[in-house]
Amino acid sequence: MKNIETPEKHDMEMNIEEPNLKSIRESKGLTLKEIFQHTRISVTNLEAIENSQYHLLPPPVFTKSFMRTYAKFLNIDDKILLSRYDRYLETLKEKHYDADIKKTPKFSGIHYKIFAWIFFLLVIISLVTFSLSSYQASVDTVKNQIVQSPPPTADVKPSPAPDAKTEMTTGAPTTPPAAPLSKKTQPPVATKKVQTASKRDHTADVTQSTAKQEELTQEETHADSYDVIMEARELTWLRITADHNPPQEILLKPGETIKKSGSKFTIDVGNAGGIDIQFDGKSLGILGRHGQVVHLKLP
């Protein structure tokens, strides 16, 4: 028969093999403040690591780094601490998975039948309303055709015939000819006004084109690109957003550098005292303390 290890037995073995960090620290005569001065790990994080209170620690990337540095400072193996922490992360994943399974609704066949009947009733109601509306529209058109009366006919009377006697005596049409317009009564020619209006329109078009050119030059000057160079002195977590691109998370080790180009930047620094940032060839100086989180917007 093979021995099958249960998770409880595995956890018991891990608890037995896991070293007591607090007793080791006290045997060496060290306090948490002294360890903080050497490792730059906060006292609260050190206490959480010693008491296995992993829910009080930062994200796994920083927690694993803290465990390595703390184990190295105490001259113990860090594999046991990291394996125990990995087991804790796996249990969290299992809990989240179980919670998601419980949240998923279970629809029975009765619900599907109810939804089918509701859909069928809605289709019937829509068809009935459409047929009633079309029937009402046809009835209204017929009523309008009946009510409308034919247009009245205009009475046309014959015009009186001209008298023959008057035509013979006068020998000319009764209406006098229209007199020609004199030079004084003719309206003045507005050629000068048309020329001035065209000149004004031309100057307005020129000013509008120059304004558009100035706006384009301003947009081009605003769209200049800059270079950002980040060099890590210590382990530092970064979140960089350049222009409208999606944010990028990076974990820089000591001595590593990264360069980004763009017109606008949003940078989140997880360790302000452990990184040097140069923007457009100029250093930004000291950003803050070790372990301090800083938010930057450039330019």
Image (cartoon, rainbow, N blue to C red):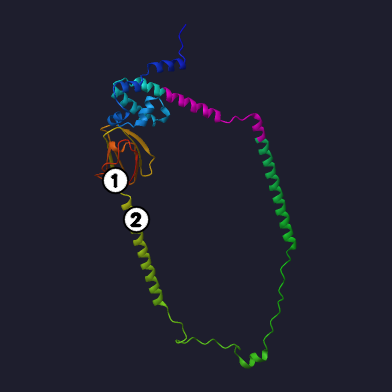
The residue singled out by tag 2 in the image is: 216
Q: Residue at 37% x, 23% y: name it.
A: 82
Query: Position of 85 compared to 131: left or right?
Result: left
Which corner quadrant of the image does residue 271 belong to?
Answer: top left
Q: Secondary structure at mark 2?
A: helix
Whether residue 241 is situated above or below residue 144 in the rendered picture: above
Specify the amino acid type for callout 1: Tyr
Q: Residue at 27% x, 30% y: name it.
A: 38
Specify the amino acid type for callout 2: Leu
Residue numbers of the magenta segment = 87-114
The residue singled out by tag 1 in the image is: 226
**Spot occupied by residue 240 in the image (x, y as percentages of width and height):** 35, 39
The nearer-to-camera label among 1 and 2 is 1
Query: Position of 56 compared to 76: left or right?
Result: right
Magenta stretch: helix, strand or loop mostly: helix
Residue closest to the eye, 246 or 284: 284
Whether residue 190 is situated above or below residue 149 in the rendered picture: below
- Point out the tag, 1 or 2, that comes first from the N-terminus: 2
For mark 2, does the 10 Å Cα neighbourhood hold few (<14), some (14 to 19), or many (20 or more) residues?
few
Q: Residue at 41% x, 30% y: name it.
A: 56
